[in-house]
Image (tube, rainbow, N blue to C red):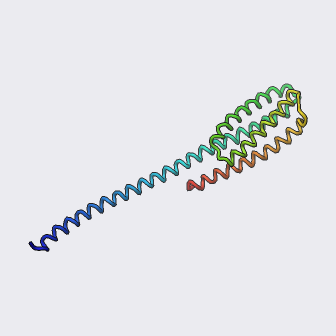
Amino acid sequence: MDVGAATAPLVAVVGVVGTLLSALLTQRAADRGRRREQERAEEVRERRRHAQELRACYVALNTSARQYLAALTDQVHALGRDEELRTARRRLTEARDQYRDVYAEAQMRMPDRVLALAGGLSHDLGTVYGMVRRLDDGVPRAGDSPAAVRESIDALWDRLRRMRQEMRSELGEFRTDSGR
């Protein structure tokens, strides 16, 4: 048997198998690449969705805190004016309830560094609310006065500003992280 005659079919078979394997390997590599790209795109979508949810949470918390502070201010101004006091009391109760609901949800979403600021603000809002209610009920404690309440409210506005800056910073990290 001639070696050259036997080699030619063998080379042809190896060539065909090589061509088929090459196409198969190229297809598998392309599939892996597409899968990785889809996973990356899904991760980006998930980060964006999370950032949007967090932003909505921050907006709601900021809005409700501002309304709560405004209602506390209105209540202090209305002390001694019976016709305005009923409306101010109702508004304060509604603002406080709204804030508590929003804050409760925010506690489940916010990162620790923002939560620490929000927790301190929430505690101090409750303290000022107690002062306002005692003044309204005519049973103030030592240190409870409209002037003390106004001073505390001014300090709370500053704390809200700091919390808002931290929220923006946190959202900025998401913006950078998601490639925007």
Kindly give the residue lying farthest to the front in the view shown.
1
Q: Residue at x 85, y 40 (%)?
A: 150
Horizontal side of residue 118 vs 77, given as left or right: left
Q: Is residue 134 above or below residue 37?
A: above
Horizontal side of residue 35 vs 149, given as left or right: left
- Picture coordinates of residue 3 (x, y %)? 13, 73
Quadrant occupied by the N terminus: bottom left
Q: Residue at x 13, y 70 (%)?
A: 6
Which image quadrant for residue 119? top right
- Picture coordinates of residue 69 (x, y %)? 78, 38
Horizontal side of residue 41 vs 120, given as left or right: left
Q: Residue at x 88, y 31 (%)?
A: 140
Horizontal side of residue 53 vs 20, given as left or right: right
Q: Is residue 121 above or below residue 14?
A: above
Which image quadrant for residue 56? top right
Q: Residue at x 64, y 53 (%)?
A: 172
Quadrant occupied by the C terminus: bottom right
